[in-house]
Image (cartoon, grey):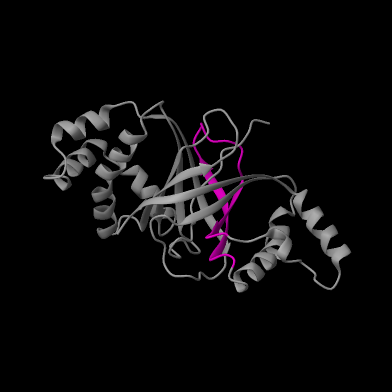
Amino acid sequence: MKKIILCFITLTMVNFITAQQVAVADFIHLEEGVDSDYNTLEKIWMPFHNSEIKAGKKMFWAVWKIDNGPEMEKAPDYVVFNIFKDENQQKSYMKNWDGDMSRKKIESLNRGKYSKSTIKNIMNKKIKNEVRSYTIKILHQTVMTGGEAIIGDKISMGAMREKSDDYEEFEMNVFLPMWEKQLLNGKISQWSFAKVIDKNEAANDVTHMTFVFRNNANPGDVMFMPNNEWLSNKIVEQGLTTREFWPSEATLVYMSN
C-alpha cells in the first residue's frame, strides 16, 4: 500500500468544528524553493477568507505548516482547512465557486497592500506541485481547555486506514478514555476523531483522522484499565491492529479573524 499523507487541523483549534460541521483539508506539496511565495499567496488570500466568513459562506479558515510528516513521495509542506457549518453549505460553496469573481474580490480587498501586478504574478506562478484534498466530519471530540488557538500552537495529527469493522468502537471505547485522562492531567488541550467522507483523486487511502491539540502527553502515563495491566495491554494491542496509523506534527501559521 502506498504511504499515506497525514492530515489536518485541529478541527478543534478554537472548538471550531463540532457535530454536523465539516472541513475540507488540502494537503499541499510545494514546488522546489517557493516557500516564501507560498506564504505571500496565503497572505493575499487571507482578507478574502475573512470576507467569506463574515458573509456567512463558511465558518473558519486556517493554515498549518507541517513540521514532522511521513517519509513519502511528495510529502505535504502545509495543510489548509476550510470549515463549513454542514455538508450542504460545503457543497453549495464548491458548486457556486467562481474563480474570476474571487480574483477580482482579492484584488479589491488587497488594495493598498499588494499591487495588481504582484497579485497577478503570485496567483499565476506554479507554487503548488500537488494538492491532496479530504473532506472530513467530526465523529467525536473532547472539551477544549487552555484557551483559544494562537499562531504558533502545535497539533499532532493521525491519518488512519480502517482495517476492521470494529475500528471506530475501539477508538471511542478504548483510546478516547485514555485521551480523556491525558486531558484531565493537563497534558493535552483537546482530542478529536473524524471520518473522511470525500476526497479528490490525488488523495491517499485514509478513512479516519485524529487530532490532538497542544499535545504534551506521554502515552505510557495512562492505562485503559489501571487495575489490570495485563488485560489493559491486551485490549490496547487488539485496538492497534484495527487500523494503520501515520503520525504527523504541525504548527499554526495563519487563521481567520
- The percent coordinates of residue 164 (x first, y second) are 75, 48
Position of 179 with respect to 242 (left or right) is left
Which is more toward the observer, 26 or 39?
39
Q: Is residue 78 left or right of residue 233?
A: left
Residue 190 visible somewhere in the drawing = yes
Residue at 61 percent across and 38 percent down: it is: 205
What segment carries the magenta color? 187-215
Res 166 quadrant in image: bottom right
Q: Between residues 79 and 198, which one lies in front from this camera angle?
A: 79
Q: Position of residue 249 (x, y in %)?
A: 54, 48
Q: Quadrant of the C terminus?
A: bottom left
Furthest toward the right, the residue is: 230
Q: Is residue 37 above or below residue 16?
A: above
Q: Quadrant of residue 179?
A: bottom right
Q: Nearer the viewer, residue 186 or 92?
A: 186
Residue at 77% across, 55% down? 239
Q: Residue at x 51, y 50 (%)?
A: 136
Left or right of residue 185, residue 137 in this image: left
Give percent across and percent down for residue 221: 71, 65
Question: Is residue 24 on the magenta stretch?
Answer: no
The image shows residue 108 at horizontal and vertical percentages of 14, 44
* 191 drawn magenta: yes
> Residue drawn at (20%, 43%), measured in percent from left and top?
106
Q: Is residue 182 left or right of residue 132?
A: right
Q: Quadrant of the N terminus?
A: top right
* Location of residue 185 by image quarter: bottom right
